[in-house]
Image (cartoon, rainbow, N blue to C red):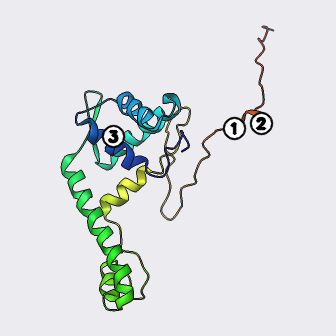
Amino acid sequence: MNPTNLGKQNGALVMEVLKVLGRPATSFEVAERVSDVYRLPLQPIRPVVTDVLEGGVRQGLFSYRNHRYSVVQPVVDQLRRDIDKYASEILAMDTGSSEGSSETSLDDAAGGSGGGGALPQMSPLMLKLQKLDGSPPMLAGGNRYRRTTMGEQQERLPSGDVPIGDRVEVVMLPVSPI
């Protein structure tokens, strides 16, 4: 697992940690828990956890009060129901394709045109949770999130990790006044 992105389930991981804690927690407490559970160094993952928490507040998945984050329980309950429904639709597709009878109804439920093989659509809450998985790494200065226009795909930014052998040493020398 790359400590600068926590894998592909950032949002679900942070949400689960907040649920397990069972109380509002600071971003440091959440990052510390992730660090302990996954045996990762705290410093590289802390900004990622903070970005996920801030994004979750913007998406309505988490609340923020008195410098502490917590899950929005009704949203989490609805998300769980949506995920269960999505999983059962996918499982029904597997059994339906061998029977040949339920393919059309699943495609209709997924917004497909009955062509078979299309996955069911994810719920809006599932899409919000998925957006947290693509949180870009922290950027220096101003706005940390690059805005994309309609139809433009967001470019994935590299993590910034450089192998030790490829690093270039930069020496800063004092500049004398003119």
Tell me if label 2 and label 1 are in contact, CB under 8 Å: yes
Percent from the top left, x then y, of residue 4? 54, 39
- Which residue does the image show at 40% across and 75% down from the upper left? 119
Q: Nearer the viewer, residue 134 or 1?
A: 1
Q: Position of residue 133 (x, y in %)?
A: 45, 51
| Residue 34 sits above or below residue 99 on the image | above
Going from the N terminus, do you reach mark 3 or mark 2 first? 3
Locate the N terminus and report the quarter of the image it occupies.
top right
Disc marking residue 13 = none
Q: Mark 1 or mark 3: which is in front? A: 3
Q: Secondary structure at mark 1?
A: loop
At x 62%, y 46%, the residue is: 158
The residue indicated by pointer 3 is 17
Q: Which quadrant does the C terminus fall into?
A: top right
Amino acid at pointer 3: Val
Determine the CA span between mark 3 and mark 2.
35 Å
Q: For mark 1, what is the residue?
A: 162
Secondary structure of the residue carrying numbered label 2: helix
The residue singled out by tag 2 in the image is: 166
- Where residue 57 appears, as percent x and y from the top left, is 32, 43
